[in-house]
Image (cartoon, rainbow, N blue to C red):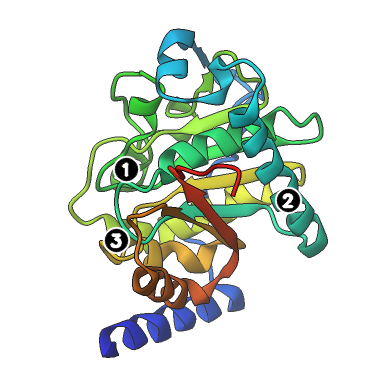
Amino acid sequence: MERIKQALEKARQERETRQEGSAVARPVPPVPAAGDAGGSGAAVTPAVSLDEAVLRDKRIIAGMAPGSFPDAYNLLRTRILQVFKENGWNSLGITSPGPGAGSTLTALNLAISMAREVDYTVLLVDANLRQPALLGQLGLEPRPGLSDYLSSDTSLTDLLFRPGLVEHLVILPGGEPLANSAEMLNSPRMGRLAEEMKSRYHTRIVIYDLPPVLGSSDTLAFAPHLDAALLVVEDGVTQKQEIEQAVELLSVTNIVGTVLNKSESPGS
């Protein structure tokens, strides 16, 4: 318990420091919205084709017909957008207490649902730098991503792509897995990137797929950059104590709600 309190205090101090502002040593290039040109205006974010059969198999709503499953994400989208409008928020982290709850699937489907709203563009970031999973869910091969940007001089515009079948959505993959993921997520370079992604376009929602809260310090390290967090829990698996501990750790940001995933009684 003492470890949790120390981690919470450190995260709060870091958030206060960021809010006070500091000199920027390395400017971050503008992060384009869906279909926009890159920072120099020289290149358009490339589109990557997706296999609808793979999307259906992975339960990604972009490849599914209208029904109760996509409708559930549309309802979640509406509720979150209402809260975001009321508070002037536009960055959301999606995580879970432990592994296997379905936070990556939730992040993808919520991003797709939001991108279908005509008033918004969405930037989906795979911030699980220990085990990037977004590309696998889409049936795509590994490719450079956020970890490469943070650990080298890789251009950000070379890492972004637009998934086919989904307009107004741009994805920044996780890239090569990193052993020092918490340090990279807590680095000044990541802080500047998070601020650029958040503030560049007033109609953009930034969604981060984050690792489990209790498995490492990664999510806690990054939480001060978020306007809000969404907690995904697994029906019949996630324990009450784990939820309480995760909520306490996430108290450095706003918790917009929880999602009960893999429920055997979806109408409950």
Marks 1 and 2 sit apart, C-alpha to C-alpha, by 32 Å
Crowding near the residue tagged with mark 1, few <14, some 14–19, many ≥20 C-alpha atoms within 10 Å: many
> Is 119 positioned to the left or the right of 233 in the image?
right
Q: Quadrant of residue 183?
A: bottom left
The reply to whether the C-beta atoms of the residues labelled 1 and 2 are less than 8 Å apart is no
Identify the amino acid type marked 3. Answer: Ala
Residue at x 51% of width, y 75% of height: 252
Indicate the quadrant containing the N terminus: top left, top right, bottom left or bottom right. Answer: bottom left
Q: Earlier in the sequence, mark 1 or mark 3?
A: 1
Disc on res. 147: 1
Residue under numbered circle 2 = 79
- In terms of sequence position, does the residue under pointer 2 or pointer 3 come before the other? 2
Left or right, residue 27 beside residue 84:
left
x 31%, y 35%: residue: 175
Query: Residue visible at 55% across and 46% down?
Result: 207
Label 2 element class: helix
Of residues 77 and 253, the one drawn nearer to the viewer in this rendering: 77
Relative image position of residue 76 (x, y in whole percent): 66, 45
Residue 184 marker: none
In front: label 1 or label 2: 2
**Residue type indicated by callout 1:** Ser
Front label number (2 vs 3): 2
The crowding category of the residue bearing disc 2, from other C-alpha atoms within 10 Å (few below 14, some 14 to 19, many at least 20), is: few
